[in-house]
Image: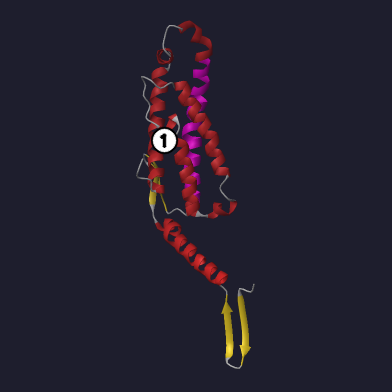
């Protein structure tokens, strides 16, 4: 079946178009309309992401929004993305949450296509993520993760009568650790809220 036939006769040029070609043209029109209305618009909406005094203005592409969405999901579904309750949340579990997020966030960075690395807006997201990983999460984990793990190994048997939270509160540097953890927790929550605003989620 010919989708397009062009012939000449005594009456001039004759063009015959099959129904298949007409359907394809209509579909392409609607696809282009959808891309322009629902995807292309993201490239022109400026938003602010970050925490505290470290914030960047960004006009994301659709691919940038996909990265932001992945990060928002990972943070929102982990302990690190929720406000710490000192009476119930365990430092050990929160530290594990940070450790797992560090690995996942690094993989998200790896998934960014190489051709996107020259895009200034994508560079802002990469810079922000590297900063939260290397300047905030890594120093905290390097300092406190080994100490709290050692505390567990050396003292857990000696405090069997205590609840897990009460046991952690016996840690000699508990107040110092908790102060730093609460500060980091606040930065992560602010970052997550800005990611939420960037991708346009208003129902959570």
Q: Residue at x 38, y 48 (%)?
A: 200
Q: Vertical placement of 138 versus 145: above or below?
A: below
Q: Quadrant of residue 85?
A: top left
Q: Is residue 62 magenta?
A: no
Instruction: Name the residue beneath numbered marker 1.
Output: 188
The picture places residue 189, in percent across and down from the top left corner, at: 39, 35
Q: Residue at x 46, y 33 (%)?
A: 136
Q: Is residue 146 magenta?
A: yes
The picture places residue 100, in percent across and down from the top left corner, at: 53, 31
- For the C terminus, the image quarter is top left
Foreground pick, 80 / 122: 80
Q: Residue at x 61, y 73 (%)?
A: 3
Q: Residue at x 61, y 82 (%)?
A: 6
Q: Vertical placement of 19 versus 170: above or below?
A: below
Q: Vertical placement of 132 versus 151: above or below?
A: below
Extent of the magenta region:
122-150
- Which SS does the magenta portion mostly show? helix
Foreground pick, 97 / 7: 7
The picture places residue 59, in percent across and down from the top left corner, at: 42, 54
Q: How many marks?
A: 1
Q: Quadrant of residue 40?
A: bottom left
The picture places residue 86, in percent across and down from the top left corner, at: 37, 21
Foreground pick, 59 / 73: 73
- For the N terminus, the image quarter is bottom right
Q: Vertical placement of 70 versus 143: above or below?
A: below
């Amino acid at each position: 079946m010919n989708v397009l036939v062009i012939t000449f006769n005594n009456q001039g040029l004759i063009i015959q178009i099959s129904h298949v070609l007409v359907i394809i043209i209509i579909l392409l029109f609607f696809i282009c309309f959808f891309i322009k209305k629902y995807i292309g618009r993201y490239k022109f909406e400026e938003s602010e992401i970050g925490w505290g005094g470290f914030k960047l203005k960004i006009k994301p592409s659709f691919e940038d929004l996909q990265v932001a969405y992945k990060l928002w999901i990972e943070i929102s579904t982990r302990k690190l993305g929720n406000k710490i309750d000192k009476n119930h949340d365990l430092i050990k579990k929160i530290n594990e949450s940070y450790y797992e997020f560090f690995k996942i966030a690094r993989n998200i960075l790896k998934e960014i296509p190489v051709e996107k690395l020259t895009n200034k807006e994508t560079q802002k997201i990469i810079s922000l993520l590297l900063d939260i990983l290397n300047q905030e999460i890594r120093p905290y984990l390097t300092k406190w993760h080994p100490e709290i793990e050692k505390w567990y190994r050396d003292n857990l048997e000696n405090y069997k009568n205590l609840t897990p939270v009460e046991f952690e509160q016996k840690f000699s540097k508990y107040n110092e650790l908790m102060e730093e953890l609460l500060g980091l927790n606040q930065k992560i929550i602010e970052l997550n809220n800005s990611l939420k605003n960037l991708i346009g989620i208003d129902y959570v």
